[in-house]
Image (cartoon, helix red, strand yellow):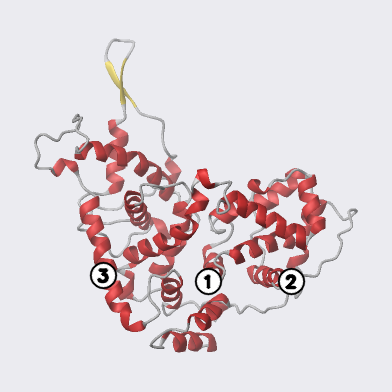
Amino acid sequence: MSNRKELFLQILSQDKINRAEFENACFQGIPDGSGLRSTCWKILLNYLPPCRSDWEDVLMKQRNAYNQFIRTMIVDPNQSQDSSDHPLSSSPNSTWSEYFKENEVLSQIDKDVRRLCPDLSFFQQPTKFPASFCSQSLRTRVEQANLQAMQVTQSKAGGSQLIKPKKKYSDDECYQILPQGQEAHWEVCERILHIFALLNPGIAYVQGMNEILGPIYYTFVTDSSEDEVQHAEADAFFCFTGLMSEIKDNFIKILDNSQCGITHNMDSLMNMLRDNDPQLYHALTGRNIKPQFFSFRWLTLLLSQEFLYPEIQRLWDSFFADSERFRFLLYFCCAMLVAQRTRLINGDFIDNMKVLQRYPIETDIYQLLQLACQIKDGKLILHTVPTESPPANNAGSTARSPGLLGGLFSRARNR
């Protein structure tokens, strides 16, 4: 057993976890396996309290509450015993009326979760613990809603014909339908997001929330004991809810230009870049490369679309353990820019947008973490990049040079 695993087991075995010591350890990276990351994220996202003696009661209460949400909130109006309640009812209390309203949001959720992390087969695979007590499959519900949306038109010959509505997604985005009684992991995510939208009508569902939920649910299923995996859906729901309570302002359009909105965060990133790398800052602004072209997605989705899932897990260890809560996300995004400074300073608008919107996948995130810490601690040292450097397509990133940034951060996933 590695020293880092021993350290985490020791910290987690305490009757009351020392929050500062725990966050510092998590910030350096949580080792893979043994359910450590799953447990640590639940603590960092305030799902589990610091006292171990309270864990069993909290988990039992929350998991039962979530199962109750499923039973009471996912309702099939066809099973209603009220004969006066029917699909054409104009009553404001009609179950059918609410059902149709919910379908509008549910259709968007269904579209997004079907294409959740398409490079990873995990979400297409069946879960070992489908919610058999759920009265209705949301996937089937959306398919029925789409069928009901078909229009009846008159053909040239005088007969009637059905016209399908425009597809919400292409055929290659539709996952293979599993046998009756089975659920794919993307369907579980669909249910989590649907219940979240129902419980939070003020924000409901905004495109991109699926990318926040994905890594949490994936971690709870793949990095937990068998006993914990059967409760991954409930645990992921509450951790996702807790995380959204902290970052929801990024998803609320009317708050974009407020002190807590996404525009303020993007401006903070550019100001940080200006203070740490004036040459790169002026190169980007001089080419009219605005932060919303790239950093809107970076900051809103916590970089969940820029890196592979194992790398996202490592990054989120530090983001969740950040004592300033997501301030380190800004430092890391600034490091992403600085790491590509040679290419960005010498590239034109099109070249730079290719780099920023499809960040080089070969980049070493541990070097980026090191660079982010240098920016955070005010220890970043840069040299002026000569403008007569080779063209952007041939220029390498200085941050990817072997040994340039050292190795303060342990490669926890390899231990």
Residue at the (27%, 61%) spot, across then down: 66
Where residue 358 appears, as percent x and y from the top left, is 64, 52
| Local SS, label 1 | helix
Residues 163 and 86: in front is: 86
- Image disc number at residue 61: 3
Instruction: Name the residue at the top extreme.
Output: 157
Q: Distance between the Cα atoms at labels 1 and 2? A: 22 Å
Please determine whether, in this image, residue 405 is positioned above or below residue 129.
below
Callout 3 amino acid: Lys
Residues 295 and 107: in front is: 295
Can the viewer see residue 228? Answer: yes
Of badges 1 and 2, the one in the foreground is: 2
Of badges 3 and 1, the one in the foreground is: 3
Callout 2 amino acid: Gly
Q: Which residue is mark 2?
A: 378
Residues 117 and 240: in front is: 240
Sequence-wise first label, 1 or 2: 1
| Local SS, label 2 | loop
